[in-house]
Amino acid sequence: MIQVTAQMRILLSIQPADFRCGIDGLARVCRDELQSDPMSGAIFVFRNRRKTSVKLLCYDGQGFWLMLKRLSTGRFRWWPQSPGERASPLEAHQLQVLLWNGNPEHADVAPAWRSVAATG
């Protein structure tokens, strides 16, 4: 089982991927196009051209996990549009919002880190 924590590195591929690819094909995309090691423990997020499905690829130390979510109706409305960029980092809470077909940029959450005042 994969548990997404706030400390995990999550990379979202901006360009659509060929969903006929399995683990090996997406791992090649990680290496060649995203310049990242697919065995680093990061979660890599891909979408298909029609924006109806996303795939997540993750290595857990023993093997790869490949997860797929296909919407029953509609399309994923949000996906970053960054000319010249190949990947966009995501926070764990942003991934959760994206998987529920929301806009992670508009998620109203507390900052990932805030200082704690010393008492005494």
Image: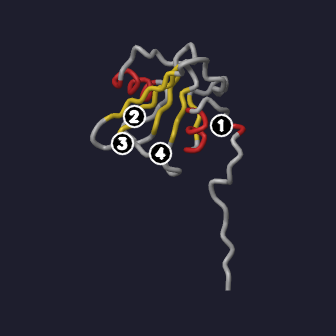
Residue at mark 3 to residue at mark 4: CA–CA distance: 10 Å
Residue at label 2? 38
Against 10, residue 5 (above or below) is below
Please identify, in this view, whether the residue under mark 2 or under mark 3 is nearer the observer: 3
Residue at mark 4 to residue at mark 2: CA–CA distance: 16 Å
Residue at label 3? 1
- Residue at the farthest left position: 62
Q: Earlier in the sequence, mark 2 or mark 1?
A: 2
Badge 2 element: loop
Residue 104's tag is 1
Number of residues whose C-alpha sits closer than 10 Å to that of mark 1, classed few (under 14), some (14–19) or many (20 or more): many
Residue 23: horizontal and vertical position, in percent?
35, 25
Against 10, residue 52 (above or below) is above
Given contact means CB atoms under 8 Å apart, are the residues at marks 3 and 4 in contact? no
Q: Earlier in the sequence, mark 4 or mark 1?
A: 4
Kind of residue at badge 2: Pro
